[in-house]
Amino acid sequence: MAKLTNAQKAASKEVAEKIARGSQPASTPVTTTNSPVNFTDAKLPGLLTITPETVPGMMPKFNPELYKIEDPLNPPESLPQATQSQFDTGMKVYEDATRAIKLTGAALDLTREKFTVIGKHSKAFGAGVMAATETEKVRGNVLDYLSQKETTSQKGIGLDINQNATIVNGNIAVLTKQDSDEKLKQAEIKSEELRLKTIEAQGKLNSFKQQLGEYMEVSR
């Protein structure tokens, strides 16, 4: 936080004294009337006012009819014109004036923020007192939250373990199924080999029987 200067300290002290004086009861009774207050006619010193009726007087003179052009390639000499010197001088004046009015606006913004911060300072002080009252209540809630957070973390660890076990068991099941499928294929291949060998052996046996029969016939 920036250190306050002596002038700022004096200004803050003066504001605090005015606020303190304003909070004291008035020494003289305040009289009231039943007559309505006309806020339209109420005027505050230093407050700038603007109405739709006063806007035209605040606008620069401008006549669009003077800038009417029928042929863009042949502009009329009656158009309002300015020399380069007038343009440069005028633009410089407008730029300087723009910077000046922006500085004025910045000063007003700063003043507005100063008044806003004075109000916020009072509200913050009151909020601090209320916060101090609620601190002990919140402390218990925080302890409950931390305890529940640990419980939740433990449940999360258990869930992570179970999920990992599910993934591992699933992978094992897939591999087991693949192993069973491979064994089944190998068994089918062996069965087919045995069947072919049987057919081959049967063929040889039939051929042998046929040859044997022919031999017996010759021997007779």
Image (spheres, grey):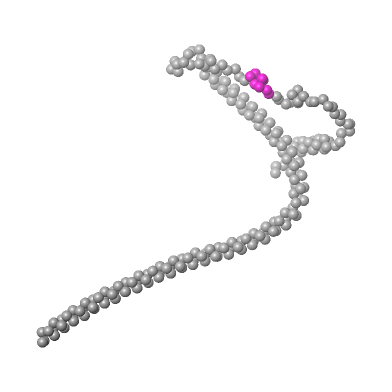
Q: Residue furthest right?
A: 28
Left or right relative to 106: residue 29: right
- Name the image quarter holding residue 212: bottom left
Q: Is residue 43 visible?
A: no
85 shown above or below 191: above
Confirm whether the magenta stretch covers residue 152.
Answer: no
Residue occupying image coordinates x 82% and y 35%: 22
Left or right relative to 60: residue 116: right
Residue occupying image coordinates x 18% and y 81%: 209
6 shown above or below 200: above
127 shown above or below 55: below
Q: Which residue is nearer to you in this view: 32 or 8? A: 32
Magenta stretch: helix, strand or loop mostly: loop
Q: Which residue is nearer to you in this view: 7 or 197? A: 197
Left or right relative to 159: residue 48: right
Where in the figure is residue 104, as x and y percent of width and height?
A: 66, 28
Where in the figure is residue 84, as x and y percent of width and height?
A: 52, 19
- Name the image quarter holding residue 16: top right
Where in the figure is residue 180, as x and y percent of width and height?
A: 40, 70
Count the marks: how many? 0
Confirm whether the magenta stretch covers residue 55.
Answer: yes
Residue occupying image coordinates x 74% and y 43%: 124
Residue occupying image coordinates x 86% and y 30%: 30
User: What are the residue bounds of the magenta stretch?
Assistant: 50-57
Where in the figure is residue 28, as x and y percent of width and height?
A: 89, 31
